[in-house]
Structure formats: C-alpha cells, structure tokens
Amino acid sequence: MKQKCADVNLAGGYAVLKDLVGVAQYLLISTMRVSGIESPSLLEPDSSNCFRAAWQSPHYVDDKLHRRLGRDEVSLAINSTDGRTQNQLHIHIDCLVPDVVRTLREVGPRLGTQWVPLPVRLRGHVYSAIRIDDADLAHTDSLRCSRRTPRNAASRWAIRRFC
C-alpha cells in the first residue's frame, strides 16, 4: 500500500508520513540516504537536524488522537541496527503509554546530561537516558544531526532502547 506524505520538506531534508502501525504513529524519514542513527553523515555540519524536525512534529499525533499531548507524553524512537527492518533513517513519532510517562516523570529529574542506563526497565526493556537542556532540540549535541553550540533551555529527557 502506497502512503501519502503528510509533509515533505526538501530544504529541511525530511518527509513525514503516517506509519502503517499504530493509531497515531508517524515516521519522519530523512530524504538523504542515511542508513541509521550510527551514520557518520549525521554529524556533518551541513546535515539536516532531523531530531528537531521530529520534535516539532507531534501535532500529527495530536490531530489523530483529537487531543493535545504534553511534551513529556510524546516519544521519538529510532530502531537499533539489530531492530530495524529498513536501511534508511527514520524516527517514530508517537505518544507514550501512561505507565512509561509516570516512570519517566519519576526518574527524569535525576538524569544528567550524559547517557546512563535507566534505573528501571520500561515495559521489560533496558534503556539508557539523558537529560536534554534544549527544549526545541535546536542545539543538542547528543541527539541531533548537525553540530551547533549547545544552549540552555527547559530540561527534557530522552531515552534509547538497547536491544
């Protein structure tokens, strides 16, 4: 089945489309050939900031759910090399389930600015987490696709799953 894009931003280097999986899950896909999160091309100075674009895209999820989610109820997920079925970078944009939101609200304030294992499992899986002091992900060295000088803003946290 062919999917229609919800947004195509060639200047930004991405497209957004509704995932075939999930009620409200969307995918932000790099328009450049990028195999995955481990690709060195993501650290090139002129690469697009796909994480920022994904972080600014939860309105698609909101629209599907007919309600506005809090920022701590939205997830960005990227499959590990072992967990992917495609060889093209894409970021899953979806809502978090309530028990994960509660857990992250509990442990999130204790997170630092370096990746560390979460002290608890989330739905049976081991994750690492980091606090992000950049509310719009415009300048976040540890997650973004291009290098810029970090600046402080409201704290957030991110998680990544180890498969």
Image (spheres, rainbow, N blue to C red):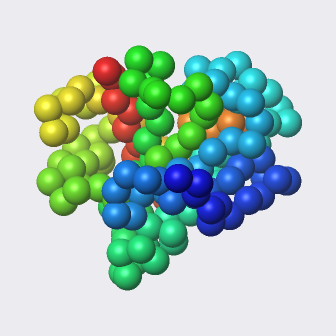
For the point 60% across and 34% down, which residue is it? 89
At 63% from the left and 38% from the top, the residue drawn is 144
Residue 63 vs 134, above or below: the answer is: below
Q: Indicate the quadrant where residue 82 lies.
A: top left
Question: In the displayed structure, does residue 156 sit left or right of residue 51?
Answer: left
User: Which quarter of the rendering shows the C terminus?
Assistant: top left
Q: Position of residue 55 (x, y in %)?
A: 55, 56
The answer to whether residue 40 of the structure is visible from this angle is yes
Counting every numbered tag in the picture gives 0
Give the x, y percent position of residue 69. 37, 71
> Is residue 37 shown left or right of residue 85?
right
Tell me if 138 is positioned left or right of 20 in this view.
Answer: right
Residue 79 drawn at (x, y percent): 44, 31
Whether 102 is drawn above or below 69: the answer is above
Q: Nearer the viewer, residue 148 or 96?
A: 96
- Residue drawn 36% across the image and 80% down it: 67
The residue under the point 64% across, 61% down is 5
Q: Return the residue found at the far front.
A: 1
Closer to us: 138 or 150: 138
| Any part of residue 56 in sight | no
Is residue 59 or residue 116 the one in the foreground?
59
Which of 82/85 is in front? Answer: 85
Tell me where residue 146 appears, x and y as whole percent.
Answer: 74, 36
**Residue furthest toward the bottom?**
66
